[in-house]
Image: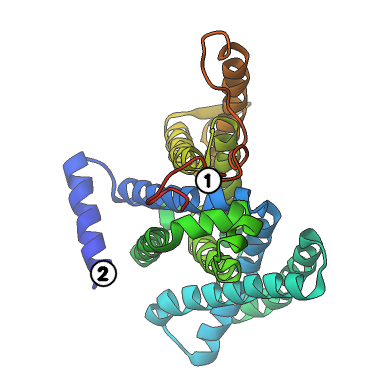
Amino acid sequence: MPDELLADLIRSLAGALGTELFVVKSALTLLVMCLLCGLIGAMVVGNRMAFFSDAMAHCAFAGVALGYLSVLFTGGDKATAAWLIPVVMVVFGVLVGGLMVFVRDRTGLAHDTVIGVFFAFALGFGAMLVKLVQQESTVNLETFLFGNLYFISESDLALLLAALLLTFAAFLWRYNQLMFASFNPSLARTRRMSVTFNNYLFILLLALVVNLSIKAVGALLINALLVVPAAAAVNVSRNLRQMFWVTVAFSLLSGALGYWFSHTRTISVGRIKDVSFGPSGVIVVASVFVFFGSMAVAAVWNRFAPIFGGQQFRRPGGGNPDDPCGMGHGFGQCP
């Protein structure tokens, strides 16, 4: 039912705009995906978990293989696969992410060491399953490495919309504590916040975003959208509130620039004429250009701001220990 309503909406939009169905569908998918990555990205960078999100993306590859095997073993049809594969992917991602945090806390090993162990496990486990999946079905798992915005189904788009609503609801509920625990866990504990619960909630949200987005941008590219816009936001933000909203803005800007460029620009190499760019790769490259642009803007601003009485940019979370977020109260602000 939600798929049919979404399909009717896409057809109506395509008719009103006078464009193709796949253009509207891919644009909506990109909008939802960039919002998701923007919302989560600030906490990924704040937690210094760029490598962690990369490991989660590669764990998703193993989750895809497990999902297809689950469909084969249960004898499910295409309708069953549409919901069973995402469920298996998300559950597997949550389990692996939770185990990473659990092993780190219990062993005292460095974070990157624990991530490296699970990173190797996910890649090895996925490689074990790939051959079996290819023998039993015609599915090409490489499509999940790079993704394809143009061929995403209505059911996948509906899942992304559900993930966006769930993420937004979680932020309305516990945004203050999530951000506080992300940037200053010691201070969060002194204020009697459950840092452990917030960490596991963050893992759940990250697993949802990564596993439900890889069809659109691929497992190899999702990490860039989670990290690069947030890294660019750090360059031009003075506090966590600014960083959060600038991350969302930069994520949307990168998506819009990359999508526009892939649609309007082609290249010619020798006898090969008018070759278009793949949208996923262009979006990530655009986000990197946004990052370097933010560096340039920050350098110029910090150089001339004191002359004109302005405030320089500084790393969010620093400064006054009584107000590390530079905020007040309410959504998007620390307590």
Please name the residue that numbered disc 2 is placed on: 2
Above or below, 68 against 53 in this view is below
Q: Is residue 202 left or right of residue 160?
A: right
Measured from the top left, where is residue 116 in percent x and y?
79, 63
Quadrant of the frame with the N terminus? bottom left
Q: Nearer the viewer, mark 2 or mark 1?
A: 2
Which residue is depicted at the point 55% across and 40% down? 229
To which residue does mark 1 refer?
280
Residue 99: in sight, yes or no?
yes
Residue 182 found in image quarter: bottom right
Q: What's the residue type where badge 1 is placed?
A: Ser
104 and 79: which is toward the camera: 104
Secondary structure under the numbered disc 1 in the rendered image: helix
Quadrant of the image occupied by residue 267: top right
Could you tell whether 266 is left or right of 127 in the image? left
Of the numbered discs 2 and 1, the one sitting upstream in the chain is 2
Secondary element at tag 2: helix
The one of 175 and 88 positioned closer to us in this rendering: 175
In this view, 139 is above or below 245: below
